[in-house]
Amino acid sequence: MNRNVLYEPFSIHFETLDVFPDKESKKNFFELVFILSGTGRHCINKHSFSYSDNHMFLLTPQDCSQFWIDTTTRFFFLKFSNIYLKDNRISKENIQRLEFILENANHKPGCILKNQSDKTLVRPLVEALIREAVNKDVYHSDITSQLINTLIVVVARNIAKYLPQKIDEASESRIINILNFIQSNIYEPEKIRTENICKTFGFSENYLGKYFKKHSGETLQSYISNYKTTLIEHRLKHSSNRISEIADELGFTDESHLNKFFKAQRGKSPKAFRMEFVAL
């Protein structure tokens, strides 16, 4: 099996197809696929979904993905490599959003644009990226980076609305706001303490615990711990950051504190986890 490797932080590609190429290859990148026009079906990890105009899919290196085209389809592909997470041109805030997207990409198969209004927002962003790629006018690199960063924020918003598992479009806005608050402040432990969340959203501590469990399917502390663990895993897999640097960024007192936390969550040290991933 061939290995499809992306050496740049990102690449943009677009084409019109009647038959999608049958690609049997491993890859080292994540991929956003936007449907500009056309219909068909997308199969990812044995789950099949109909696609049409303005649908967007997010694929990880582990995904088994294939498109079957019913009517001529205009595709837009935006590929992200792990290098993107190390690119100094990208703000720390957007790297964190990108981490969130990539780590949760395959939790909800199908079109990732859950907000109907965002489908109309994403399309002009994609069309602008295509124009910049074609015309390569003055400052096109800077404009392309800004457009991609905006796209990242929109995609992150749509994925955020559907985590954890019980959260969907029918969920109360308050639980979604609480989850967004936790995700936005996960790097600042003081802000996501129970007492501060209660103060921010007007809950008593006793009621917050019951409300969160009822609407999310897990306890508040379990959600925070699980989310923080996935961020640590992502840094271990997709960055060259030292464990001490990861500990500092995520608000642990020191490397030993992170090691103890991660081992309790995953049964192995961060170093062992990283070595296992690299060996794959």
Image (tube, rainbow, N blue to C red):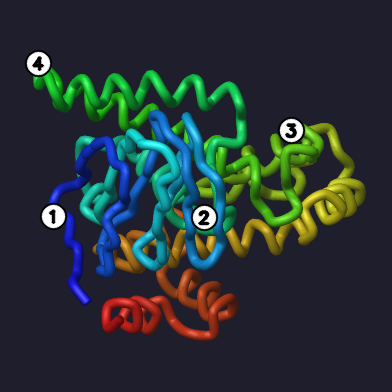
Residue hosting label 2: 104
Mark 2 falls on what kind of element?
loop
Question: Image point 36% across, 23% down: which residue?
Answer: 125
- Residue count near mark 3 (Cα–Cα under 10 Å), binned few <14, some 14–19, many ≥20: few
Secondary structure category for the residue under label 4: loop
Q: Are marks 4 and 1 in contact (CB under 8 Å)?
A: no
**Contact between labelled residues 4 and 2, with CB atoms less than 8 Å apart:** no
Q: Which is nearer the N-term, disc 4 or disc 1?
A: 1
Closer to the chain start, of discs 3 and 4, is: 4
Q: Residue 48 placed where, x, y %?
A: 55, 57
User: Mark 1 is on which residue type?
Assistant: Tyr
Question: Residue 159 sits in which quadrant?
Answer: top right
Q: Which residue is mark 1?
A: 7
Q: Secondary structure at mark 3?
A: helix
Q: Nearer the viewer, residue 228 or 36?
A: 36
Q: Is residue 151 left or right of residue 113?
A: left
Q: Residues within 10 Å of mark 1 (few under 14, many from 20)?
A: some
The residue that disc 3 covers is 200
**Gap between marks 3 and 4 measured at Cα:** 46 Å
**Residue at (64, 40) in percent of width and height:** 161
Q: Is residue 168 left or right of residue 87?
A: right
Q: Secondary structure at mark 1?
A: loop
The reply to whether discs 1 and 2 touch (Cβ–Cβ < 8 Å) is: no
Q: CA distance from mark 1 to mark 3?
A: 43 Å
